Amino acid sequence: MSYVKRDLLVHFDDASGQYSFFAVDATDATPLRAAAGGKLAADASFFGDPGSAQAEQAIGRLLLTLLDRAYVAAPPASPDTQTASAQAAIAAGAAEFAQFVELQSRAMKEYSADLLAKAEDLLKAAASLGHEDAAEMLKDWPTVKIVSQKLIARGPH
């Protein structure tokens, strides 16, 4: 049996909230790659040692950043819960992190380097206030930022 090179196709279905992964023959994927209007390439070492948990996490975060998906708002809470949650969120930098997520998304949709820079400032502010997700995201931000800048520079297809 001969070796067949495979490509990975990742799809997010908004309706079902499911990710689908397809291993397709690389030859069959050639028209898809050509229609994509460009590529974003990085040497494997860019993500860390191949096969390491660090590399896998960096690639996973990058994939989630690049996938276009709708973010669902949390269900409404009681007024007392909202007040307590708002106070805790402000103290922990959640407002800054939520604004970062929104601005990063807009930066990618609008191909705006200015919005990306503002998003980065909000991410750093949220991390400095002790927001755990922001601190984690900040670790991968250099990679995400480079990729985002390249996609913004490339513009719409």
Image (cartoon, helix red, strand yellow):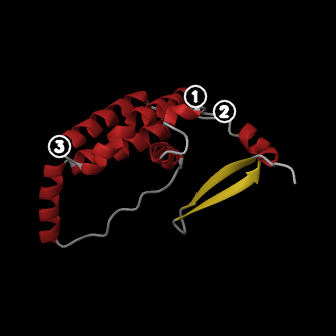
Judge whether residue 99 can be spotted in this image.
Answer: no
Kind of element beneath mark 2:
loop
Alpha-carbon span between mark 2 and mark 3: 38 Å
Crowd band around label 2 with a 10 angstrom C-alpha radius: few (<14), some (14–19), many (20+):
few
Q: Is residue 110 left or right of residue 21?
A: left
Residue type marked 1: Arg
Kind of element beneath mark 3:
loop
- Residue at image mark 1: 154
- Residue at image mark 2: 38
Q: Residue furthest bottom?
A: 78
Q: Could you tell me if the residues under marks 2 and 1 are in contact, i.e. CB atoms within 8 Å?
A: yes
What's the residue at 49%, 42% (across, down)? 55
Crowd band around label 1 with a 10 angstrom C-alpha radius: few (<14), some (14–19), many (20+):
some
Q: Could you tell me if the residues under marks 2 and 3 are in contact, i.e. CB atoms within 8 Å?
A: no
- Name the quadrant containing residue 119: top left
Q: Nearer the viewer, residue 118 or 144?
A: 144
Q: Nearer the viewer, residue 21 or 118?
A: 21
* Whether residue 5 is situated above or below residue 110 in the rendered picture: below
Q: Residue furthest top?
A: 153
Tell me the mark number nearer the camera, choosing from 3 and 1.
3
- Residue at image mark 3: 129
Q: Earlier in the sequence, mark 3 or mark 1?
A: 3
